[in-house]
Amino acid sequence: MVKQKMSQESVDLVHLRSGGCCERCGASSSLRWSIHHRQARGMGGSKDTDANLPANLLLLCGSGTEGCHGHIESFRGQAYADGFLVHKWEIPADIPVKLVNGWRVLDNGGGSQQ
């Protein structure tokens, strides 16, 4: 598999959508932050170009082992229920996620709606 690189445009759109804050708890991203993939890329990356589109990405505080990002990885059942994780057969842009500002459906243009 060839790993698809996340574009700077996708990162910028996620930062704009989040207002520079963790999309789960609202903490300022001036703390340690990371970009979380709602739908896992799989071992070693993915050929799926949709994996790095804004509807599949969230700005979260922490890393995969700490902060909100770590919480999602540690409590995966709840993360699926809250839309922070999306199954492989689902389309991230169709699955609402429970963000700090309420339930939202994310789009690939960097926006969201209730």
Image: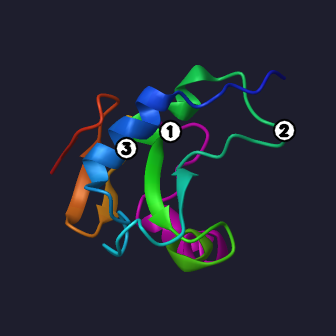
Count of picture labels? 3
Q: Which residue corresponds to mark 3?
A: 14
Residue at the spot 50% in from the left edge and 39% down from the top edge: 90
Residue at the spot 58% in from the left edge and 47% down from the top edge: 87
Q: Residues within 10 Å of mark 1 (few under 14, many from 20)?
A: few
State the separation of the CA atoms marked 1 and 3.
Answer: 20 Å
Residue furthest left in the image: 114
* Precedes in sequence: disc 3 or disc 2: 3
Label 1 secondary element? loop
Q: Which residues are magenta?
A: 71-92
Numbered circle sitting on residue 90: 1
Residue at the spot 30% in from the left edge and 72% down from the top edge: 26
Kindly identify the amino acid type of the residue bearing the numbered disc 1: Glu
Label 2 secondary element? loop
Rendered location of residue 70, percent (x, y): 62, 74
Rendered location of residue 57, percent (x, y): 47, 45
Numbered circle sitting on residue 44: 2
Label 3 secondary element? helix
Residue at the spot 47% in from the left edge and 72% down from the top edge: 31
Which one is in front, 23 or 105? 23
83 is higher (above) or lower (below) than 17: below
- Mark 1 near mark 3, Cβ–Cβ under 8 Å? no
Q: Select label 1 or label 3 by which is in front.
A: 3
* Precedes in sequence: disc 1 or disc 2: 2
Q: Is residue 59 left or right of residue 21?
A: right
Rendered location of residue 58, percent (x, y): 44, 52
Kindly identify the amino acid type of the residue bearing the numbered disc 2: Gly
